[in-house]
Image (cartoon, rainbow, N blue to C red):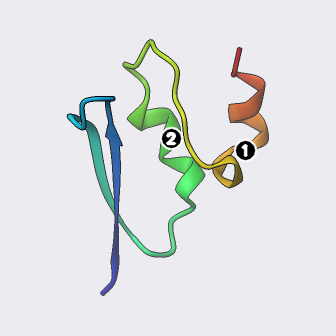
Amino acid sequence: MALKLYLIINDKVGIISVNVTITNVDDRKLVPDMVDNLWVLLYGYKGYISNSLEKNSP
């Protein structure tokens, strides 16, 4: 079974959030849970932005 690892790190390379899934999970579905407690700007690959995530951006 193949797995995918997701990390959110800060500017000092400290790990803020971690998630592991099987390979067939849509990457964009993890974002709301992983960033729920973050109150700063979030940077990532443009290809991962879904319509609902884009609408919530400032």
Q: Position of residue 13 (x, y in %)?
A: 24, 37
Q: Residue furthest left?
A: 14
- Asked if 2 appears above or below 31 in the picture, the reply is below
Disc 2 designates what residue? 31
Q: Position of residue 51 (x, y in %)?
A: 79, 39
Q: Position of residue 45 (x, y in %)?
A: 61, 49
| Quadrant assignment for the N terminus | bottom left
- Asked if 25 appears above or below 55 in the picture, the reply is below
Asked if residue 56 lies left or right of residue 6, the reply is: right
The amino acid type of the residue labelled 1 equals: Ser
Q: Residue at left 64%, top 51%? A: 48
| Quadrant assignment for the C terminus | top right
Residue 53 occupies which quadrant of the picture? top right
Asked if residue 12 lies left or right of residue 40, the reply is: left
Q: Residues within 10 Å of mark 1 (few under 14, many from 20)?
A: few
Q: What's the distance in space between the residues labelled 1 and 2, CA to CA?
A: 10 Å
Which residue is more in the foreground, 23 or 48? Answer: 48
- Asked if 9 appears above or below 25 in the picture, the reply is above
Q: Are marks 1 and 2 in contact (CB under 8 Å)?
A: yes
Name the secondary structure under disc 2: helix
Q: Position of residue 47 (x, y in %)?
A: 70, 54
Q: Residue at left 51%, top 34%? A: 32
**Numbered badge on residue 42:** none
* Mark toward the start of the polypeptide (1 vs 2): 2
- Asked if 34 appears above or below 50 in the picture, the reply is above
Disc 1 designates what residue? 50
Q: Residue at left 51%, top 28%? A: 42
Which residue is more in the foreground, 13 or 19? Answer: 13
